[in-house]
């Protein structure tokens, strides 16, 4: 998000963890960028619908979509015996 915002993109971030979203959005804004964040769980239909409604811009245009679910998640840390 920060890289895209630094290049002038208006960004939308989504995650299950509101605190992480708030921290990232603060960094985006500190760098002069614009964006919104939406806490949601994409495993649930309601989470997907909520994100789609909130990400909508006045032009309803999406130029770049990066789906990075699970990025930063370490399976070995959570389940070392597996």
Image: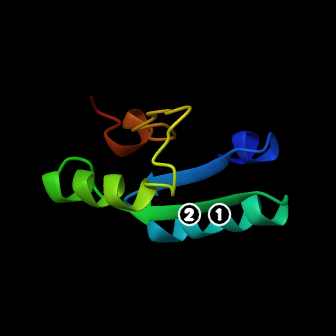
62 versus 55 height, above or below = above
Q: Residues within 10 Å of mark 1 (few under 14, many from 20)?
A: many
CB atoms of marks 2 and 1 within 8 Å: yes
Describe residue 10's horizontal placement relative to residue 15 as left or right: right
Outermost residue, front side: 59
- Residue that numbered label 2 is attached to: 36
Disc 2 to disc 1, C-alpha distance: 7 Å
- The foreground one among 49 and 30 is 49
- The foreground one among 34 and 1 is 34
Q: Residue at x 53, y 53 (%)?
A: 12
Horizontal and vertical percent position of residue 75: 37, 35
Horizontal and vertical percent position of residue 28: 73, 58
Label 2 vs 1, first from the N-terminus: 1
- The foreground one among 27 and 81 is 27
Describe residue 50's horizontal placement relative to residue 24 as left or right: left
- The foreground one among 60 and 25 is 60
Q: Quadrant of residue 39?
A: bottom left
Q: Residue at x 49, y 41 (%)?
A: 61
49 versus 26 height, above or below = above
- Residue that numbered label 1 is attached to: 25
Horizontal and vertical percent position of residue 32: 84, 60
Q: Residue at x 20, y 47 (%)?
A: 43
Horizontal and vertical percent position of residue 79: 31, 39
Disc 2 is placed on an element classified as: strand
Describe residue 19's horizontal placement relative to residue 10 as left or right: left
């Amino acid at each position: 998000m920060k890289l895209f915002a630094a290049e002038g993109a208006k960004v939308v971030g989504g995650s299950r963890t509101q605190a992480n979203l708030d921290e990232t959005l603060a960094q985006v804004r500190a760098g002069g960028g614009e964006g919104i964040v939406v806490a949601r769980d994409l495993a649930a239909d309601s989470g997907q619908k909520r994100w789609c409604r909130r990400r909508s811009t006045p032009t309803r245009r999406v130029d770049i979509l990066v789906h990075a679910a699970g990025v930063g998640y370490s399976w070995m840390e959570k389940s070392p015996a597996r």
